[in-house]
Image (spheres, rainbow, N blue to C red):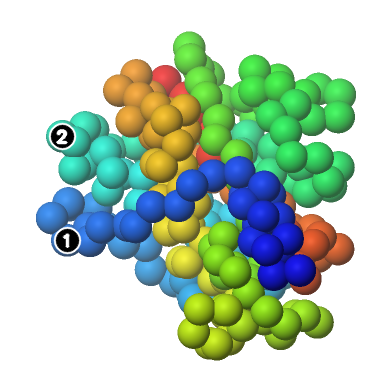
């Protein structure tokens, strides 16, 4: 059972995780606000989540001498449509089963965001910070198998950091984050409290240039 849980985590996350280095050398400003709020709390603060993902994304770009990305209401809206659409459909995909917003181009036009090129990263995660690690327990009371410590609920801060770290560990996702032709980014989440392991989070990161 423990092995199956470990395999399940790896299959659902679909991304390798990497350790996030310190960001002190880069001139990005860490967002303020209630960043330690549980990711499962409603209503979702999409602007705060997007700002946190943007911060970690720009740290990665800064380390490589690249220009930081900016955000706009339109590109944030496009990311929200994708993330919430995935959660509503319970469908982890870049293609939504919803007329008018099925693909990236549809969503950008729907959001009124002009673009010449664009890209998306998506991820499927959990309300709890399971992080692909082996765990024991159930009923929303999980413990890490390695040390017996309780598994905490994901916060806005912890989920944003983990997502950017895991995207950076994947060549295709990393290429979007480090694409010099992009100048804008928005990120959002969709919540599925009915999902496995006491709730799942569908995340979207949308880019444009």
| Side (left or right) of 21 relative to 89 | left
Tell me the quadrant of the picture where the N terminus can be found.
Answer: bottom right
Q: Does residue 44 show up?
A: no
Tell me the quadrant of the picture where the C terminus can be found.
Answer: top left
Q: How many marks?
A: 2
Q: Residues within 10 Å of mark 1 (few under 14, many from 20)?
A: few
Question: How far is the residue under mark 2 from the one under mark 1?
Answer: 15 Å
Residue under circle 2?
65
| Rendering coords of residue 181 (x, y %) | 34, 19
For the residues labelled 2 and 1, say whether their Cβ atoms are less than 8 Å apart: no
Q: Residues within 10 Å of mark 2 (few under 14, many from 20)?
A: few
Give the quadrant of residue 197: bottom right
* Secondary element at image label 1: loop
Residue under circle 1?
24
The earlier-in-sequence mark between 2 and 1 is: 1
Residue under the point 71% across and 55% down: 8
Q: Does residue 122 show up?
A: yes
Residue under the point 49% across and 84% down: 147
| Side (left or right) of 207 relative to 21 | right
* Secondary element at image label 2: loop
167, above or below 36, in the image: above
114, above or below 191, in the image: above
Residue under the point 46% across and 66% down: 157
């Amino acid at each position: 059972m423990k092995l199956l849980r470990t395999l399940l985590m790896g299959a659902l996350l679909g991304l390798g995780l990497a350790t996030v280095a310190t960001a002190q050398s880069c001139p990005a400003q860490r967002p303020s606000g209630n960043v330690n709020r549980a990711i499962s709390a409603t209503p979702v603060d999409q602007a705060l989540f997007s700002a946190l993902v943007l911060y970690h994304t720009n740290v990665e770009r800064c380390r490589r001498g690249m220009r930081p990305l900016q955000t706009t209401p339109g590109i944030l809206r496009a990311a929200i449509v994708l993330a919430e659409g995935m959660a509503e459909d319970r469908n982890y995909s870049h293609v939504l089963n919803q007329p008018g917003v099925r693909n990236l181009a549809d969503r950008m036009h729907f959001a009124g965001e002009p673009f010449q090129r664009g890209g998306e990263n998506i991820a499927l995660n959990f309300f709890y910070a399971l992080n692909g690690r082996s765990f024991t327990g159930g009923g929303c009371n999980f413990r890490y198998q390695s040390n017996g410590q309780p598994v905490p609920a994901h916060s806005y801060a912890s989920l944003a950091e983990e997502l950017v770290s895991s995207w950076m560990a994947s060549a295709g996702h990393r290429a979007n984050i480090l694409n010099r032709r992009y100048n804008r980014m928005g990120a959002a989440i969709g919540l599925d409290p009915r999902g496995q392991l006491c709730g799942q989070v569908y995340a979207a990161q949308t880019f444009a240039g």
